[in-house]
Image (cartoon, rainbow, N blue to C red):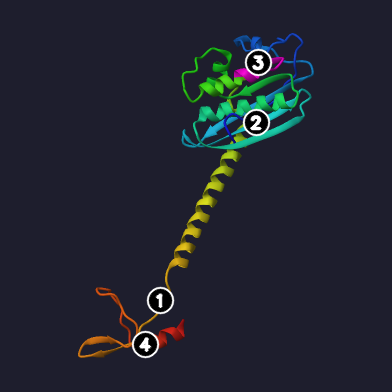
Amino acid sequence: MRLESIKLGHMTPASDRIHADAQSSIFPNDSARKPATSNWAIAYTDGGSRGNPGPSGYGVVIQADNGSILAELSEFLGMRTNNVAEYSGLLAALEFALANGIPRLRVVSDSELMVKQIRGQYRVQSPDLRPLYEQAKRSIAKLEAFQIEHVLRGKNKKADELANLAMDRGMRRKSELKTTTVASSNAATNAEAPPVRPLRGIVKEGRINLLEGSIPEGTIVVVMPEKALGQRAGRS
């Protein structure tokens, strides 16, 4: 999946007092407001990387205001940093909301860095995160209302599980592809190897005179009596 693609996370009840415009609901105190009416969704998002950078993926659980699960999203991202994976989860949640007519979205994430950057509390200095941040802000502006809050990882277990499953899938595919490539390479090498055909000769005065065929000058050869060769062929 390309990093520009988007998906979503968890939902919560909405409040009529919530700002009608997406950007006005990103201020620090907004996370304390709990949606209490319909048309809100909560997106629990998480991203991870094994190596940072390393094999990475994200997981998103999107929940309606009545507690029902709208979607569970996960994707392997390849070799990325943990923060890129976190932003990819946020983008996935936003994309889902916009594609499915969800006007109000509340995002829950255990990435304090991302949450504070989206709120404007931290600057986005990383050149890798800047385009993802700007894409997220553009998507947020298309919503009627938006909230984002930070929680500890223990309160984001399902999204974390989905992110790890995505990484497991991606790493397994990579391992299987490597095994297939090696097997194909070995098969091709064996197919290209010319067949080995013994040449008959006779020993005279300590020298071997070939009775058929020829061998290039300087070639190292293995000499075996014809009787022993026949016995060996019979055992194979």
Residue at image mark 3:
141
Q: Amino acid at mark 1?
A: Val
- Identify the residue at image location x=50%, y=59%: 184
| Amino acid type at mark 3 | Ala
Q: Secondary structure at mark 4?
A: helix
N-terminal-most mark, 1 or 4:
1
Q: Tell me, for residue 47, which label it has, or none.
A: none
Q: Nearer the viewer, residue 156 or 115?
A: 115
Locate residue 182 relative to residue 89 in the image: left or right: left
Q: Is residue 116 magenta?
A: no
Residue 131 screen position, x and y as percent: 53, 23
> Residue most toward the left?
205
Q: Where does residue 182 sit, x and y in percent of width and height?
A: 48, 56
Q: Residue at x 46, y 22 (%)?
A: 126
3 or 1: mark nearer the eye: 1
Q: Residues within 10 Å of mark 1 (few under 14, many from 20)?
A: few
In the rendering, which numbered label is found on residue 60? 2
Q: Amino acid at mark 2?
A: Val
Residue 9 visible in rendering: no
Mark 1 — residue?
196
- Measured Cα–Cα span from mark 2 to mark 4: 69 Å
**Cβ–Cβ below 8 Å for labels 1 and 2?**
no
> Which residues are the magenta region?
137-145
Q: Residue at x 32, y 88 (%)?
A: 211
